Amino acid sequence: MADNQTTTKDAGSPAPVGPALEAEPRNDNVAKDDASDRAPSVVSSSTSLSSSILQHRLENGRTYHIYKDGKYLFPNDERENERLDLQHNLYLLTLDYKLGLTPPNEKDSGVKRALDIGTGTGLWAIEFADEHPEAEVLGVDLTPVQNRLYFLTLIPIEFIWSHVISVPPNVKFEVDDIEQSWAYGEPFDYVHIRGMTSSISDWPAFLEKVYNGIAPGGYMELFEGHARTQSDDGSLTPEHAMWQWADKLDECCKILGRPFVHVPSLVPMLKEAGFVDVKIVPFKWPVGPWAKDPHYKELGEWAFANALEGLEAWTIAAFTRALKWSYAEVQTLLSEVRKDMNDRSIHHYTPMWVIYAQKPAEKVAGSS
């Protein structure tokens, strides 16, 4: 599924990620859904718990975390939780329903301690704990894991959402700022990081903390992508609202001190931190089911739903805080971006990468 083919970059355009995707022939008789501003309901809905449990503040109709206010730009409300659950399935589909590419993800790997950074709704941590009952799994985030999971034992049964997720006894969640000093006790055999590209202010310093928090011989794994979509056939251009939106979002994140990182640049940073056997694997998330290949068509359906639902979440706080745009101005731009997203003649995709590496094992005393 992944292809490590080396590609060259044309001046003024993003470098292609792996082989070019072939678009399926268009059927212009298919009804368009340009008016849609919400993604289809791909994941099952749930009953929200009492709002008094969550610590948050309301801004432009969305809720945001209070702990370390402003360090994470995206909402923490139930609408966003459902999108994160959807996105989790997109990650899994990309990796053929594996939780990761590193040896700790293999059955009977013997992993003892695993850390999930930016755990979100906690699904990755829960599924990893299920697959590895021998492991102690910790998920950390700036906002509490959605209360339907985190406070399951603290609330009346009538508040529990309609389909109960069983939380394994070997997983726990903590609210923490991973850019501060780590105090997790014993080191981890495996650190998993996903979707943190615009949430870290100093990547070299952060990766040094990750390195120091891993036991000798342990692994780290990142799954990150770019905000700017790109096309292999030139169908996405700087004149499109989608391109201009990405420019503005990048500007916002720089102003707010958490710029998007060029994901391949993390490879030399990991080596500088001390990691060895650093590997990078490229992937593509087509925006919409335009690809001819059945696998990429399915990925495109999920990625389209994720992007359509996530668009406002990724935009509203960044633009109103950094650029001082009004809510109405943001919605006007997003309306134009949605038109581009629904335009099947634009064959664009989100470039994604998995990067994984190992901390060197300690040398046995007396060995050369």
Image (spheres, rainbow, N blue to C red):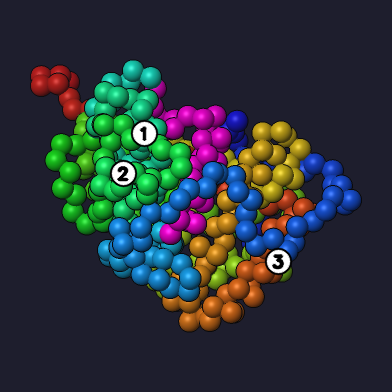
Residue 166 image label: 1
Q: Amino acid at mark 3?
A: His
Q: Tag 2's secondary structure?
A: loop
Query: Marks 1/3: CA distance?
Result: 45 Å
Which residues, given as a range, are shown in magenta?
Answer: 77-106
Q: 204 or 165, which lies in front?
A: 165
Q: Quadrant of residue 49?
A: bottom left
Q: Residues within 10 Å of mark 2 (few under 14, many from 20)?
A: some
Q: 99 or 200, which lies in front?
A: 99
Residue denoted by label 2: 152
Residue 98 within the magenta-colored segment of the rendering:
yes
Q: Which residue corresponds to the image point at 25% horizontal and 54% vertical from the top-left?
A: 176
Residue 240: percent from left, percent from top = 70, 66
Q: Quadrant of residue 242?
A: bottom right
Residue denoted by label 3: 240
Quarter containing the C terminus:
top left
Q: Amino acid at mark 1?
A: Ser
Magenta-drawn stretch, dominant element (helix, strand or loop): helix
Query: Marks 3/2: CA distance?
Result: 45 Å
Q: Amino acid at mark 2?
A: Leu
Q: Residues within 10 Å of mark 1 (few under 14, many from 20)?
A: few
